[in-house]
Image: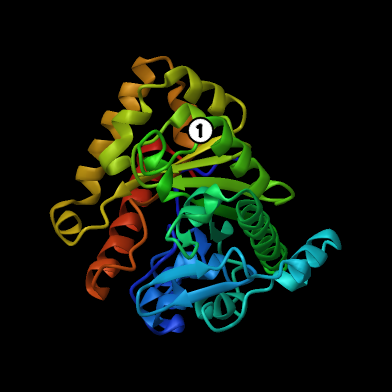
Amino acid sequence: MDWNCSTTLIGSLPFEDPAKALDLIVEEKIICAPWPQLPRLGYRESMYSQTAARLPGLVANEREGQLCVDLGDYDPMEFYTALLEEDIDYFQPPSEGHQGLYAFLERDHSSHLAVKGQVTGPVSEGLQIFDREGRPVVYDESYGEIVRKGVNMYARWQQRRLSGIHPNVVMFFDEPSLTLLGTPFASISADEAVSWLNEAMEGVDCHKAIHCCGNTDWPMVLRTDLDILSFDAYSYAHTLALYPQELAAFLEGGGSLCWGIVPNSDEGVRIETAESLFRLMEKHLDGLVAKGLDRDLLQRRCMLSPQCGLGGMEEPDAVAVLRLLRELSDLMRERYGLS
């Protein structure tokens, strides 16, 4: 699909009022509109807790901000019964912990090009749920599968609900922990990561994106069944440019890039302008074109976003990020002659 430098967000915003977050998304003309995660409302509104809401045996330590499960004392029967019966409604998340989502579902989104959902991907989710010994459950064969199936069904439930309010849906699988692959902090092979991501995306009938806000094994990510690669272009675009052949094949096969080119730091948003970010984008695009990629394809298959979520920012700075994002999109569309 041609996105023509349209805008989206990674997920979180620093508001406690869902209406305020949704109004800002409309005011700043976020073209692929996300439902907002609102972590300032408490730990249950965080990405890991939201994705884990229907996993069996899970205990949330809100004060410590940690998810735990006793692997010797949980009952997966109800979970697997719903899974085998394709009971997607079982995986409907509770309203507590999803205030932004349910407020989003009540709004009119006819003015948007697309609507966006998000889940935590299976690698990151599995690394953030711990057993009684403090070991991530991603290494437990049985519960690791539960995490992957849970991510998949949560994504499928969102996709079904979002498709009821807009014909064009994008589902992001947020995978910050992909930056840990190949280090002692994540003993997970590239083949395992690809298999787990594909398992989590199976049956999700919409545009599927993987977001990683750091450097990782990009050819490995491009081996998955994704349609959109979302990355922190402000800090790490040079790492993606090391793989021009893989990128060219991805784009020529219908893939798109979501450039996280707008900084999500207080300092960054104060020093950058739409013009300075346009020059930075041109530098990165020129580098890819010099390596053989098609400029027209890069421009048409381009989405724009902040580097990552904005939940940790102050409200005025988050507003400034969205404004800068809109201004950059307008500038790029004008100069590239995109509608």
Residue 170 placement (x, y as % from top left): 59, 53
Residue 109 placement (x, y as % from top left): 59, 69
Q: Residue furthest right?
A: 85
322 left or right of 199 in image: left
The quadrant where residue 13 appears: bottom left
Q: Nearer the viewer, residue 123 or 299?
A: 123
Q: Is residue 137 above or below residue 331?
A: below
Scheme by which the image is coloured: rainbow
The structure residue drawn at horizontal position 41% and vertical position 76%, both measured from the top left corner, is 43
The answer to whether residue 297 is visible is yes
Disc 1 element: loop
Q: Nearer the viewer, residue 90 or 305?
A: 90
Q: Is residue 86 above or below residue 196?
A: below
Three-letter residue code for mark 1: Ser
The structure residue drawn at horizontal position 59% and vertical position 63%, both measured from the top left corner, is 71
138 left or right of 90 in image: left
92 left or right of 213 in image: right
The structure residue drawn at horizontal position 26% and vertical position 29%, both measured from the top left corner, is 283
Q: Is residue 185 above or below residue 41?
A: above
Residue 155 placement (x, y as % from top left): 64, 59
The quadrant where residue 182 appears: top left
Residue 17 placement (x, y as % from top left): 41, 85
The answer to whether residue 87 is visible is no
Q: Is residue 231 above or below residue 69?
A: above
Find disc 1 in the rendering and name its residue.
189
